[in-house]
Image (cartoon, grey):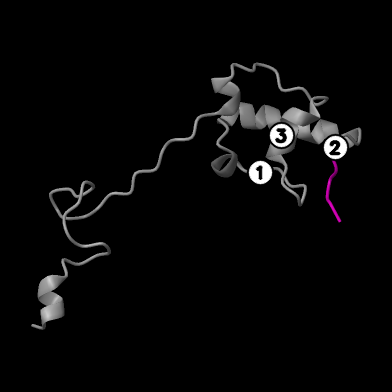
Amino acid sequence: MSDFDKDSKGGRGGGKGAGDKAGGRRTFFRRRRVCKFCAEKIDYIGYKDVKLLAPFIPERGKIQPRRISGVCATHQRALQTAIKRARQIALVPYVTE
């Protein structure tokens, strides 16, 4: 057994830190995203409100998925229909050049 094997505890990071558990593994703590619409108590997502819809449409013009935007499932469905309606009357572009 080499000195490297004796010193390393296995895994990344090694050593004992605040995040260690009994097994010596560190757990990665990710903060849970809170839905913007639930936090601000917005019930209706209107298709005419382009300022509200804009952060959920990146430069390419696609609708951001839930895991990236952090919106809950019910509000994601309402957001999706609002964006599609806004696209139909040309308030929001389908794609950018």
87 to 10, vertically: above or below: above
- Is residue 19 on the magenta stretch? no
- Is residue 93 on the magenta stretch? yes
Q: Secondary structure at mark 3?
A: helix
Give the prevailing secondary structure in the magenta stretch: loop
| Residue 75: percent from left, percent from top | 62, 27
Residue at the spot of label 1:
64
Q: Looking at the image, is mark 3 or mark 1 earlier in the sequence?
A: 1
- As drawn, the label of residue 80 is 3
Question: Distance of mark 1 from mark 2, alpha carbons?
Answer: 15 Å
Seen at 64% across and 18% down, the residue is 42
Seen at 60% across and 24% down, the residue is 37
Residue at the spot of label 2:
87
Image side of residue 76 versus residue 88, left or right: left
User: In front here: 67 or 2?
Assistant: 2
| Residue 96: percent from left, percent from top | 84, 52
Seen at 56% across and 21% down, the residue is 38
Q: Which stretch did the figure color magenta?
A: 92-97
For the residues bearing labels 3 and 2, Cβ distance under 8 angstroms: no
Q: How would you rate the neighbour count of disc 2 (Cα within 10 Å): few for under 14, some for 14-19, many for 20 or more? A: some
| Residue 13: percent from left, percent from top | 26, 62
Q: How would you rate the neighbour count of disc 1 (Cα within 10 Å): few for under 14, some for 14-19, many for 20 or more? A: some
